[in-house]
Image (cartoon, rainbow, N blue to C red):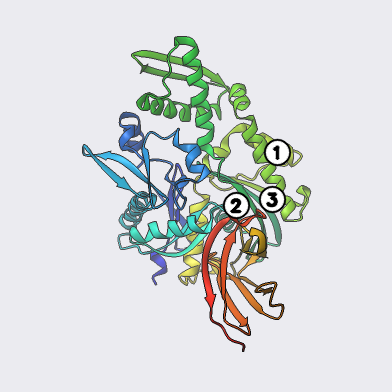
Amino acid sequence: MDSNRAIGIDLGTAYSCVAIFQHDKVEVILMNFGSEAKHQADANPNGTIFNVKRLIGRRYDDAVVQNNLKHWPFQLVIDLEKPKIMIEYKEQLKLMTPEEVSALILRKMKQIAEDHLGGPVTDAVITVPAAFTDSQRQATKDAAVIAGLNVLRILSEPVAAAMAYGLHNQISGIRQILIFDLDGGTTNVSVVIIEEGIFEVKSTSGDVRIGGEDFDIRMVTHFIEEFKRKHNKDPSKNKHAKQRLRSACEQAKKTLSSSPQASINIDLFHENIDFKSTITRTEFEKINDDLFVSMRTIIETTLRDAKMDKSSIDDIVLIGGSSRIPKIRDLIREFFNGKLLNQSINPDEAVAYGAAIQAAILTGNKSKQLERILLLDAAPYSLGIETRGGQITILIKRNTTIPTKHFTTFEVSPSYQSDKIIIELIEHDERRPTILMTPFLNQKCDVDIKVFEGQDRLAINNNLLGCFTLGYFIFI
């Protein structure tokens, strides 16, 4: 593998970024695309896809998919329990999987990197939210394969940012940092300990239902209600009007990060009626108050899981475009008793920066900057198997350092007390668990094994990773 051609990709919900480590430093490659697609979304909402990161690796009946359906102008159809996106392309209807859409983005980023580097690019480290499930990570890898990329590793976004922070600041000694990651579709928080080049993830927590896009959605709802009160007309079913309003709200959100008030001005918004309004930062914070409360809860959970007090955190690093929202910065500063936030790395580029470092390491880059860097990641979800009564028996707990393995002995059935199976569950960096079975059975039988990831005590409420049947074993 050519380390000069291994790139790091931040495949975001609303913004993506690509970087490469070369000549002993990370270079973020300028991305000059995306603005045209945003204009296209306003003009032709039926032919524009966005927020695909909230679809990839999910079933059609997933709660996140269903909750977002009413906010998307494009149509979803169900195919073998999975969502497909129906769009208008050259006056024809076309069905695309989320993986195919993500592959288009990845292929474009691959092309931009190749144009910049003057040669082919194949190897990549791609980042995903820490709260992504195994199926979402695998679907992201599938999209990369479609795009012609060889995935060296799927890396959690907060971990990538921690690596960027560590290398950029040339950390010496021990530093305990908290990474707060708010991208377009998710909120993730991680506690990472950095010591002599070793990056150890102590805990990770997140919420896939809270992202920067959700602030936009709240504002869209706010202004639609205002329009209904003023004009006694409902624009909520008007896809074109709603998409234009969504774009205006996104811009207003950005304006409110630097100004106390933002304006909305849309000509011929709905039924030839112009719409003009304003929103103050105070109003914005009020309509999103519960989201801010949830973010604080995520921070508390992450610290509790790490068994650390907030006073032990040396630095707080914010990444993701929506982390610029003043209320978020205020609540984090207040939670940490006025502690200054570390702003040494670009919140839009930090994840790709860290992914590029990992890509260089995995391809054998000999830079002295990378000599002693070692990443010890943690399992974002507990892993276990379904046992009697539909319960889940946890074999590997959430936030366990990986790779790891765990041995457990189970009885096959109540009627054969001497019949045992020893299960060895091994968790790898890629979070694709391996199960090794040692049977000690004195008769023929079938044993169904279902492996889940998640935190609920009932197996059915967790994410099924796989199932298989063991049969016809004899005594060893």
Q: For marks 2 and 3, give the CA distance.
A: 22 Å
**Above-or-below relation of 336 to 428:** above
Residue positioned 76% across, 54% down in the render: 308
Q: Residues within 10 Å of mark 1 (few under 14, many from 20)?
A: some
Q: Secondary structure at mark 1?
A: helix
Question: Is label 1 in contact with label 3 (beta carbons under 8 Å)?
Answer: no
Identify which amino acid the numbered label 2 is placed on: Asn
Identify which amino acid the numbered label 3 is placed on: Thr
Q: Position of residue 150 (x, y in %)?
A: 39, 65
First in sequence, mark 1 or 3: give its number.
3
- State which mark lies toward you, 2 or 3: 2
From this viewpoint, is residue 239 visible? Answer: yes
From this viewpoint, is residue 428 visible? Answer: no
For residue 461, which numbered disc appears in the image? 2
Q: Which residue is mark 3?
A: 302
Residue positioned 66% across, 72% down in the render: 413
Identify which amino acid the numbered label 1 is placed on: Arg
Q: Which residue is mark 1?
A: 333
Q: Secondary structure at mark 2?
A: helix
Image quadrant in which you'd find residue 388: bottom right
Q: Position of residue 356 (x, y in %)?
A: 47, 59
**Above-or-below relation of 169 to 297:** below
